[in-house]
Image (cartoon, grey):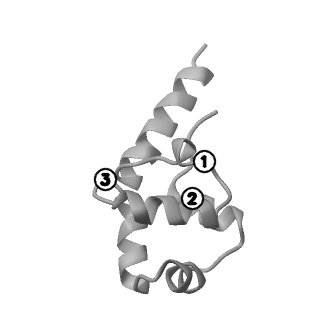
Amino acid sequence: MMELTFRLARKRMNLSLEEVAKKVGISYPTLQRLEKDTSKIKMETATKLAEIYCIDPINLYFGKESDYIKLVRETYQARCEV
């Protein structure tokens, strides 16, 4: 199973940025930034988000969302070139 980005995990649960930020106790802009780059996220925050998203933290992608998108594209392109 491929990991989910924090944004995809949130959307899978049909939650807004505002709802999640309030539950975690961080600001909307902070959560927005974290969804774009989780490489520096505090483990406490990541754990809270994983609980809200009903997902094991090991299944979440830690890093830049743009790098994740690039990785997914490369993976699926390689599969289609067979």
Q: Disc 3 and disc 1: Cα gap in Å?
A: 17 Å
**Mark sitting earlier along the chain (3/1):** 3
Indicate whether 58 appears above or below 13: above
Report, in whole angstroms, how far the alpha carbon at label 2 lies from the one at label 1: 6 Å
Residue type at mark 1?
Asp
Location of residue 18 with respect to 7 vertically, above or below: below
The residue shown at (41%, 82%) is 26
70 sits to left or right of 6:
left
Helix, strand or loop at label 3? It is loop
Q: Quadrant of the C terminus?
A: top right
Tag 1 secondary structure: loop
Marks 2/1 in contact by CB < 8 Å: the verdict is yes
In this rendering, the label closer to the viewer, 3 or 2 = 2
> Percent x, y for residue 17?
54, 80
Residue most toward the front? 44
In terms of depth relative to the viewer, which is nearer, 31 or 56? Answer: 56
Labelled disc at residue 50: 2
Q: Residue at x 61, y 80 (%)?
A: 16
Residue at 70% across / 62% down in the picture? 12
In the image shown, does 37 or 57 lie closer to the viewer?
57
Distance from disc 3 to disc 2, alpha carbons, whole Å, reads 15 Å
Q: Which residue is mark 1?
A: 56
Q: Are marks 3 and 2 in contact (CB under 8 Å)?
A: no
- The type of residue carrying mark 2 is Ala
Kindly identify the residue that appears in the image at 34 percent across and 60 percent down.
Answer: 41
Q: Earlier in the sequence, mark 3 or mark 2?
A: 3
Q: Which mark is residue 39?
A: 3
